[in-house]
Image: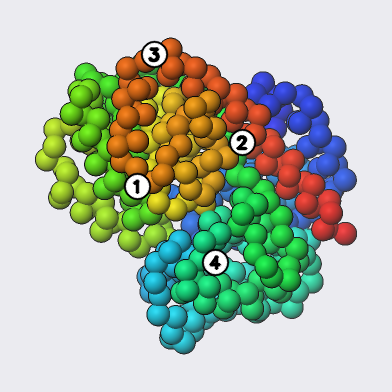
Amino acid sequence: MRKHLDDYRQYAGDQVVDEIYDSASTLDGKHVVHVNSTYSGGGVAELLDTLVMLMNDVGLDTGWRILHGTPDFFEITKKFHNTLQGAEINLTNQKKRIYEGINERFSNYTHLYHDCVIVHDPQPLSMIQFYEKKQPWIWRLHIDISNLNQDGEKLFNYFKSFIVRYDAMIVSMDSYKKDIPVDQRVMRPSIDPLSPKNEVLSDQVIDRYLSKFGVDQDKPIICQVSRFDYFKDPEGVVKIFKKVREEIDCRLVLVGSMATDDPESEAIYKHMVKEYGDDPDIEIISALNHILVNALQRRSSVVLQKSLREGFALTVSEALWKGTPVVGSNVGGIPAQIIEGETGFLLDPLDYDGFADRVKMILGDDALSERLGEAGKEHVRNNFLVTRHLKDYFHLFREVIR
Ligand code: UDP
């Protein structure tokens, strides 16, 4: 299905849409291409799905290439991801060989004649060394690298040899910038108000989807929507839920799809089902279903984002956009979205009691819930809609494409 920028005027207003058209008109006849490593299952795929369509809609010829990895490649790149977030790694030459080897193979059949190449995240980062660079290359990192441990520093140092070949690096938060000789910019991610994930749903559709996936609505619902990933802390979510349930009868729903570039999620999902699947108040769902996520974010009384580390957490903006209060960890991009006490509540990720208290406060106070929800929606409208993101990209393209 095609997307049209004009359809976004109702949410973003005329000014930003007109600005995008103006910028796009100066890039007439130009081609750009995005490269990442999965078409579904995580934030980057979610972003590209809309951005690529809208860039084409306004006349910028925009392609999307997906790096074809192997299981061992994705295991290594998932380790890279975890290491940037605080895990350890034994960065052997064998790992580097497999990582760069897959990038080399991909570059053999991926012909880049475009006027600008945007590479997302570490998986395809090293492909740049296999090209004769004829155009600006931008590396966009969606991970929080503000707090690297020793292994993280070593890994980033290895990445640096590729990063410095790029013309610019984009990060999601100011604090993610690094002391390296490359132009660095901040660009916040965004959500698409017209995607199946975020569009308005009727009560009937919400009821149908929740019942199809076995979510009972007899009690208030608390949910977290996230890949099954250690850093999304699903166990911590259960811990908070159990504390809340001691005082307020409620349900917990955990939804997590499997990204094709994330080999760990299945094991974590199975572990969660084994440990908590017997609890009648806990529903653990593994499905890639945008309407289910939409329905759940709308019908939940509180959405949690209890991440230990987080690049941005689109899931927070998704829930806020639906007027649902969010209680989240004070990490990564979450504080850009949750203004403490105004659009939700922010807590230290290890403050389980604090999390449980805030959830209980919201469950017990409809006026508070409504106030947070309304403010959250406006905050997303003003800052995290795809139109703002598109405007940022066009500013960048106008600057770097000659
Ligand atoms: N998502 C989904 N189904 C799931 C789990 C996640 O569609 O079961 C989507 C979620 O709605 C969001 C994206 O995947 O749009 C996750 O982005 P986020 O920035 O929150 O985290 P990431 O996965 O990139 O770390």
CA distance for labels 4 and 2: 24 Å
N-term-proximal mark, 4 vs 3: 4
Give the numbered dot on residue 350: 1
Query: What amino acid is labelled 1 in the image?
Result: Leu
- Where in the figure is residue 95, as x and y percent of width and height? 44, 81
Q: Is residue 113 visible?
A: no
Report crowding for label 3: few under 14, some 14 to 19, many 20 or more residues within 10 A (C-alpha). few
Query: On the rendered structure, is 160 left or right of 25?
Result: left
N-term-proximal mark, 4 vs 2: 4
N-term-proximal mark, 1 vs 2: 1
N-term-proximal mark, 1 vs 4: 4
| Position above or below: 243 against 167 | above
- Report if the beta carbon of the residue with label 4 is closer than 8 angstroms to ligand 1: no
Residue drawn at the location 66% of the way across and 71% of the way down: 163
Residue highlighted by disc 4: 122
Give the numbered dot on residue 384: 2
Query: Element under label 3?
Result: helix
Q: Quadrant of the C terminus?
A: bottom right
Report crowding for label 1: few under 14, some 14 to 19, many 20 or more residues within 10 A (C-alpha). few
CA distance for labels 3 and 2: 26 Å
Query: On the rendered structure, is 358 left or right of 162?
Result: left
Give the numbered dot on residue 366: 3
Residue 256: image quadrant is: top left
- Where in the figure is residue 209, as x and y percent of width and height? 32, 27
CA distance for labels 3 and 1: 27 Å
Report crowding for label 2: few under 14, some 14 to 19, many 20 or more residues within 10 A (C-alpha). many
Query: What amino acid is labelled 3 in the image?
Result: Asp
| Position above or below: 102 against 238 | below
Residue drawn at the location 26% of the way across and 48% of the way down: 235
